[in-house]
Amino acid sequence: MTIAFVTSSAHGAFDADLPLLVAAAEARGAGGEIVVWDDPSIDWTGYEVVVVRSCWDYLSRRDEFLAWAASVPHLHNDVDVLTWNTDKSYLRQLEAAGVPIIETRWDVAPGDDIGDHAEWVVKPTISAGSKDTARWGTRDEVWEHSASLVAAGRSSMTQPYISSVDDEGETAMLHFSGSFSHAIRKGPLLERGEGVRQDRDSRESITPRTPTPAQLEVSEHAIATACEAIGLDRPPLYARVDLVTAADGSPLLIELELAEPSVFLPCSDGAAERFVDAALARA
Ligand SMILES: Nc1ncnc2c1ncn2[C@@H]1O[C@H](COP(=O)(O)OP(=O)(O)O)[C@@H](O)[C@H]1O
Ligand SMILES: [Mg+2]
């Protein structure tokens, strides 16, 4: 029994979860191999389970990545999940089902109402690592950023900047096969006045965190709603629910990561084993 853990040629060295996953697989008497998704020499039929991990170069090659995913047997999360989840417009479906998300306006054009806020965030619907994302203090900057994304053929999201992120950060909740494993705090990423940057790195600001009952409830609601929307009969192998805190103290979903989330295994004893056990149960 061998599990393939899939990364990209540029990112494998930066994925701190990979070595822990291989070690946990070996400790369970299985094989664990780190492989690159677009390596033509890989025979994908040779693995009992193939687990998407850090294919972070898919952003500029999403169609190619999804075509690859459709061709690989025993893939987790599977192509339907990856297709649904790599475009943040899935948040509209979650919101319609009552999952609390950050107030979001889509494809804002110059002059559109963007609410009365001190600061806003504009981001593309297809993005990761806060690429092409920025925090703005004026309506003109928001309108211009959103319009430039739309002019480039992309879709944009405009949200109020949630100010609790500056102190409290965001809370990422890791679930493996629907069971809560652990949570972490991620520090703030967007600096006031900084504009668009492509090189932000959140990895240094990660610390363990104990979630509240309200955070657990919203996480479970988000995952269950995603399963319904995608048509899954069981929860995905891995899910990361990223939450921030509203002004009234309640949790708000910032994103539900079912594609290629870091799962922060070094932050929690036994997390790699829990992940691998969930993966082996799929074989
Ligand atoms: N509305 C918001 N309020 C405060 N911070 C935000 C907001 N939207 C995004 N951010 C910051 O930008 C980062 C990246 O945004 P996110 O929506 O998580 O997209 P991705 O991680 O896919 O690039 C977040 O981790 C957070 O630090
Ligand atoms: Mg994020």
Image (cartoon, rainbow, N blue to C red):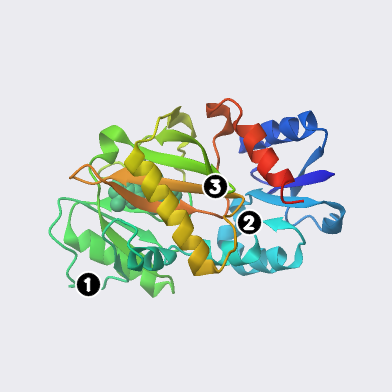
For residue 127, side relative to residue 6 (left or right)? left
| In the image, residue 221 above or below residue 179 | below
| In the image, residue 75 above or below residue 170 | below
Q: Nearer the viewer, residue 204 or 269?
A: 269
Three-letter amino acid code at the position of disc 2 = Asn
Q: Which mark is residue 77?
A: 2
Q: Which residue is mark 1?
A: 110
The residue located at (69%, 63%) in the rendering is 69
Three-letter amino acid code at the position of disc 3 = Pro
Q: Nearer the viewer, mark 2 or mark 1?
A: 2
Element assignment for label 3: loop
Element assignment for label 2: loop
Q: Nearer the viewer, residue 119 or 277?
A: 277
Residue 130 visible from this viewpoint: no
Residue at disc 1, CB closer than 8 Å to ligand 1: no
Q: Residue 106's spot in the image, x, y percent? A: 32, 69
Q: Give the Cα separation between the discs numbered 2 and 1.
A: 38 Å
Check if mark 3's residue and mark 2's residue have beta carbons within 8 Å: no
Q: Residues within 10 Å of mark 1 (few under 14, many from 20)?
A: some
Residue at disc 3, CB closer than 8 Å to ligand 2: no
Q: Earlier in the sequence, mark 2 or mark 1?
A: 2
The residue located at (74%, 30%) in the rendering is 23
